[in-house]
Image: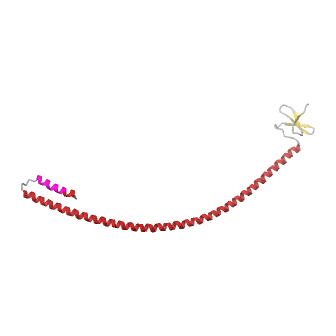
Amino acid sequence: MKKLVLFCLMVAFSSNFYAQETTAKTAKSKTETSAKKAKASADKASADAKKEATKSKKAADDAKAASTKAKKESADAAKKTADKEAAKAKADAKKATVESDKAKTTADKAKADAKKSTAKADAAKKDATAAKKSATKTLKETNEKAPSVPDKVTGEYNGKKVYTGPRGGKYYINKNGNKTYIQD
């Protein structure tokens, strides 16, 4: 505001400096005219400032009222949201309880199945042990051990099979399962 007034005065005085009129009257009338103009512009600026102040005050009041209204609405919305969340939490808790009961039932079934499979495995071990024992007895009953290297069966000696080795030696398996060589 002050700058505007000073600018107007500067313009007024500078125009007098370059003017070619010599009379003081003309300068005085110009000064008075510019002073009136400056005063009018100052009054106008003052009125504009008052209007702007009034507008800004009204805008501040409106903003305050809107803020209060928004706070109330957000409080109501927050309460509604909290109620919804509480209802959802209760429903989730019920679901979790039902699911945990199902999980317990499933776990009990799994334990029973595990016991059954353990019993089946034990029975299979017993059967395998019994089969191994019977196979061992069968081998001992024949009193013959199979040779580690498959040699050719070439005949019979005292009711036992005679084998010929890789170097040409002849033998049979005695009752202890050992090789007994036959001399020609």
* Image vertical order of residue 173 relative to residue 42, above or below: above
Question: Which residue is painted at 84% across and 45% down in the image?
Answer: 136
In the rendered view, tell whether residue 50 sits above or below residue 11.
below
The residue most toward the left is: 23
Which span of residues is magenta-colored?
6-18
Residue lying at 22% horizontally and 63% vertically, measured from the top left = 46
The location of residue 35, given as percent across then percent down, is 15, 60
Query: Measuring 8% from the left and 58% from the top, which residue is drawn there?
Result: 26
Quadrant showing the C terminus: top right
Query: How are the residues colored?
Result: secondary structure
Viewed as shown, does residue 66 lie left or right of 30? right
Estimate the x, y position of residue 44 in percent, counting from the top left.
Answer: 21, 63
- x 17%, y 62%: residue: 39
Most foreground residue, 72 or 155: 72
Residue 58 belongs to the span the image colors magenta: no
Instruction: Identify which residue, 155 or 57, lies in the foreground.
Output: 57
Q: Vertically, is 180 above or below 19?
A: above
Q: Is residue 63 left or right of residue 109?
A: left
Q: Is residue 83 above or below residue 165?
A: below
| Tally of numbered discs | 0
> Magenta includes 11?
yes
Residue 91 place in picture, x, y as percent: 57, 66
Residue located farthest toward the right when viewing the structure as drawn: 158
Foreground residue, 46 or 164? 46
Image quarter hosting the N terminus: bottom left
163 relative to 85 in the view: left or right: right
* Dominant SS type (magenta): helix
Measured as percent of width and height from the top left, residue 71 is found at 41, 66
